[in-house]
Amino acid sequence: MTQVVPKWRAVLLDFLERAGWSAGQVFIATLLAGGISSVTELPWKYSVTIAIGAFVSSVILTGVQYLSKMTNLAFWPDLLVRLAKTFLSSLAGSMTAGVFDVTAFDWEAALNVAFLATVASLAKGLLAREPAAPNGQVPPGASPSTLPTGTYREAVDHAPAPPTIAATDPPEGAASVPDGKSGVVLGEAGGSGPAAGDPA
C-alpha cells in the first residue's frame, strides 16, 4: 500500500531531495575534478562551499518550477529538467564560491564540475526509475526522484484533493425516505411499489 504524507510535508521533502542530491553531486564532482591526490590535498573547503551554493541554487530553481506549476512531468521531461537544474546549480555554486569576476573566473574548471555533476544526476535519475516494462516503455508512475512514489506524487500533483467522506454526506435536513415506508424504485418511471419480479 502506498503511503501518502500531507501535502506540505511532501513538498518540503521534494525540495530537500532535489537540493540535497544537487549539493552531493556537486561536492563529489568538485573533488573528482581536482584529480587524484592525497586526502589532505583535496579541496574540501572549496567543495563544501560550492555544494552549499548548489543547494541554495537548487532550492531557488525548484521554487520557480513549483510557482510555474511545471512539476507534474513525465519521466524523461522531469529528468531533463533535473539535469538542467543540476548544471545551473553547479555553475552558480562555483560562481558564489568567491567573488565573481568574469575576467578571472575559471570557466573550464567550473564547466568540468558542472558536467561531472550532471552525469551523476543522470545516473541517479536512471537508477531511481522503476524497472522498465516488458515492452521497454517507462512505467507511467516512474520518476527520477528517490522519494517514495506516493510522497513524490503528492508533492508534484496539482489535482485537487479528493473529497472527504464528510464532504460527500447529504446536507442536514435533506429529505429522505423514513424507515418502513416505500420510496421510488430506481429505474422505474415512477410510483412507490416494488420493482417487477420483487416479492411484495
Image (spheres, helix red, strand yellow):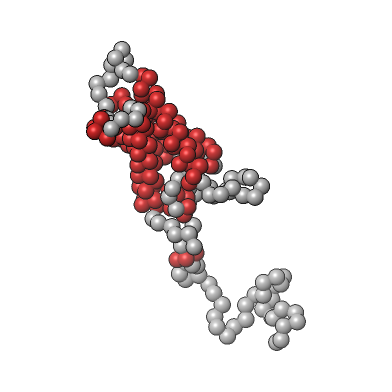
Q: Can residue 71 be seen in this view?
A: no
* Residue 106 picture quarter: top left
Which residue lies most toward the bottom here?
200
- Nearer to the camera, 123 or 183: 123
Residue 116 seen in render: yes
Q: In this view, does 186 lie above or below 160?
A: below
Quarter occupied by residue 43: top left
Task: State the image coordinates of residue 180 (x, y, percent, origin top left).
Answer: 58, 85
Query: Residue drawn 31% across and 15% down?
Result: 102
Residue positioned 56% across, 49% down in the render: 131
191 and 120: which is toward the camera: 120
Q: Where is residue 101 in the image (x, y as percent from the top left)?
A: 28, 16
Where residue 71 appears, as percent x and y from the top left, is 46, 41
Please tell me how many numbered marks the rendered image carries. 0
Q: Residue furthest right?
A: 197
**Could you tell me residue 141's position as x and y percent?**
54, 49
In the rendered image, which quarter is residue 23 located in?
top left
Above-or-below relation of 141 to 57: below
104 to the left or right of 153? left
Q: State the quadrant of the C terminus.
A: bottom right
